[in-house]
Image (tube, helix red, strand yellow):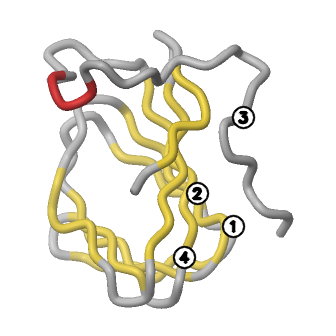
């Protein structure tokens, strides 16, 4: 279950915890996506090429770029989406959820490294 740390029209910050073997199957987002591996290791596949990414690795995706993420170990990812939301982003699944927090707030702090 993703945890939204921050959300504004400029960007959204989300933490995603993955257990070893979990996969975010091929997908895309309408926004530019920046993913940093906070802990653990994942395999990220784009255009048929997979790369192993360990703690600290930063990966960027163009808007609409298809990619797959698979946890090689238990992993924690920080996802930044900008701008938020991109034009034509479907927010129906988020209706009724309070996702905006004050600019200096963090909903669930990341554990120390």
Q: Tell me the SS state at disc 1.
A: loop
The earlier-in-sequence mark between 1 and 4 is 1
Disc 3, disc 1: CB below 8 Å? no
Disc 4, disc 2: CB below 8 Å? no
For marks 1 and 4, give the one nearer the viewer. 4
> Which residue does the image show at 59% across and 28% down from the upper left?
6
Q: Which quadrant holds residue 58?
A: bottom right
The earlier-in-sequence mark between 1 and 2 is 2
Return the residue at label 2: 36
Mark 3 burial class by Cα count in 10 Å: few <14, some 14-19, many 20+: few
Residue 77: x %, y % from top left: 54, 61
Q: Tell me the SS state at disc 3.
A: loop
Q: Tell me the SS state at disc 2.
A: strand
Figure quadrant of the N terminus = bottom left
Marks 3/2: CA–CA distance? 17 Å
Mark 2 burial class by Cα count in 10 Å: few <14, some 14-19, many 20+: some
Return the residue at label 1: 56
Marks 1/2: CA–CA distance? 6 Å
Disc 1, disc 2: CB below 8 Å? yes
Marks 1/4: CA–CA distance? 11 Å
Residue 92: x %, y % from top left: 15, 23
Return the residue at label 4: 75
Return the residue at label 3: 106
Q: Residue furthest right?
A: 112
Q: Nearer the viewer, residue 43 or 107?
A: 107
The earlier-in-sequence mark between 3 and 2 is 2
Is residue 44 shown left or right of residue 18? left
Is residue 29 shown left or right of residue 41? left
């Amino acid at each position: 279950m993703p945890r939204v740390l921050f959300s504004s029209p400029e960007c959204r910050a989300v933490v995603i915890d993955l257990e070893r073997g979990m996969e975010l199957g091929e997908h895309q987002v309408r926004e530019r996506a920046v993913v940093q591996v906070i802990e653990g290791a994942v395999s990220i596949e784009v255009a048929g090429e997979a790369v192993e990414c360990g703690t600290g690795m930063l990966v960027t995706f163009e808007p609409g770029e298809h990619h797959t993420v698979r946890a090689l170990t238990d992993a924690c990812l920080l996802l930044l989406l900008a701008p938020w939301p991109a034009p034509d982003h479907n927010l129906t699944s988020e209706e009724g959820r309070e996702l905006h927090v004050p600019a200096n707030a963090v909903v669930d702090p990341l554990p120390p490294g």
